Structures are given as structure tokens and as C-alpha cells.
Image (cartoon, helix red, strand yellow):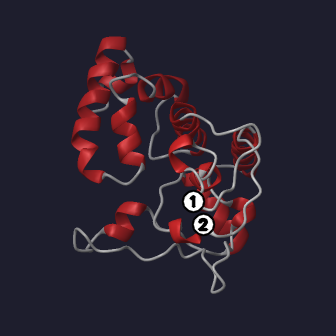
Amino acid sequence: MTTDDRHAIYAALGDLYDALPAIECRGHCWVACGPIDMSNAERDRIRERTGIEIRPVDEVRAGLPPNATPPPCPALGALKQCKVYDVRPFICRAWDVAESMRCPHGCVPEGGWLSDDEVMMMLMQSNVIGGHGFDEDKKDLLEVLTDPLVRPLYARFTRGERGVQGELGAAMDAVMKEKRLGPYAKRR
């Protein structure tokens, strides 16, 4: 990937982040800073700008007993502040602005909370823009990921439920076949 490509991806992610309502964070939500999933570009940008390596959720959880508490995010500083706040990924930016992720400390986004569907659509867009292990055409991929059959499974997958991966793959295959999205139908 060229530097120009990288800058274009970061700019597109910035446009998506700007679509989220502003919120004045009081800095008390650090207890939610655990393993998260993010796009490849977001992970790369964090590493480039801060030197902090944030591993994918499945790597962090690998080897942990099923009910074990995973370690906190490596970007969480000693004083419980985010060391990558300026380049944090979409999911961290969506915290406290999504209906289902309301701040327990009373922070309220300007204009009110976004619906879970709105946030899920934006999360999928961040993964398509920033790359999430997908090589296919991004427009077709977004069509597949937003299909009513796939969307709830993809939401569970992005929240770290890796056990849903087989069901998600089957649902994506079914949608691809139905929509006759050539490159996808041949993928599996």
C-alpha cells in the first residue's frame, strides 16, 4: 500500500468518525477498555503514531479459560487515560454515543444517542474502509454485511463472539449466492 493510499484510507475513516455525535467525556469509562476489534488500518495507524501494538480480540482471548477476564487494553495508561485517544478506532469513538452503549457516568452525546443499527452500519463501514481481512470489492462487501441475514451475525462477530464465525460464513455464502456476487461465490 502506498503512502497516498494510506492517507486516503485515514481520511475516509476521519470522515466516518466526524459523523458521530460529539460527547464530552469525563474520563470515567476506562473500565470498558478491554480487548476490542478494529480495522487493519486503525490498528496500523495506532502503531505508526504511538508505537502501541493492540492485538486482535481473538489473539488476546486465545488460551484464556472461557470465563476469564481478559487483560485491559494496552493503550490504557497508568492513570487510566487513553494513550491513543486522538487515533482511537471507531468502536472506541462509538462508546457512549450508541443507544446500547450509554455512559454509566452521565455523559450524553450532542443531539442524543445513535440507534444501534446506525452504529452497526458505521462500524461495518469502518471495517470495509480500513480493511478487515477482506480482499473483495468493498461495495459488494458492504451489501453483503448489511443484509438482514448477515448483519446480526456480523455484529456478534465484531463484539468478539468468534464461535459465530461458521454461521456467519454460511450466511454470507447464502447472501452472495442469492445476490450473485461473483467473486464472493467463488471465495469459499
47, above or below 115, in the image: below
Query: Mark 1 highlights which residue?
Result: 104
**Which sits in the foreground, 137 or 16?**
16
User: How far apart are labels 1 and 2 at the CA level?
Assistant: 8 Å
Instruction: Give the residue displayed 66% in from the left and 72% down from the top.
Output: 82
Amino acid at pointer 1: Pro
Would you say 147 lies left or right of 173 here?
right
Q: Position of residue 171 (x, y in %)?
A: 27, 28
Query: Mark 2 highlights which residue?
Result: 29
Would you say 142 lies left or right of 79 here?
left
Residue furthest to the bottom in view is 78
Mark toward the start of the polypeptide (1 vs 2) = 2
Q: Position of residue 176 (x, y in %)?
A: 34, 20
Regarding mark 1 in the picture, which secondary structure is present there? loop
Instruction: Give the residue displayed 47% in from the left and 38% down from the top.
Output: 135
Q: Nearer the viewer, mark 1 or mark 2?
A: 1
Q: Quick one: label 1, few (<14), some, or many (20+) residues within 10 Å?
A: few
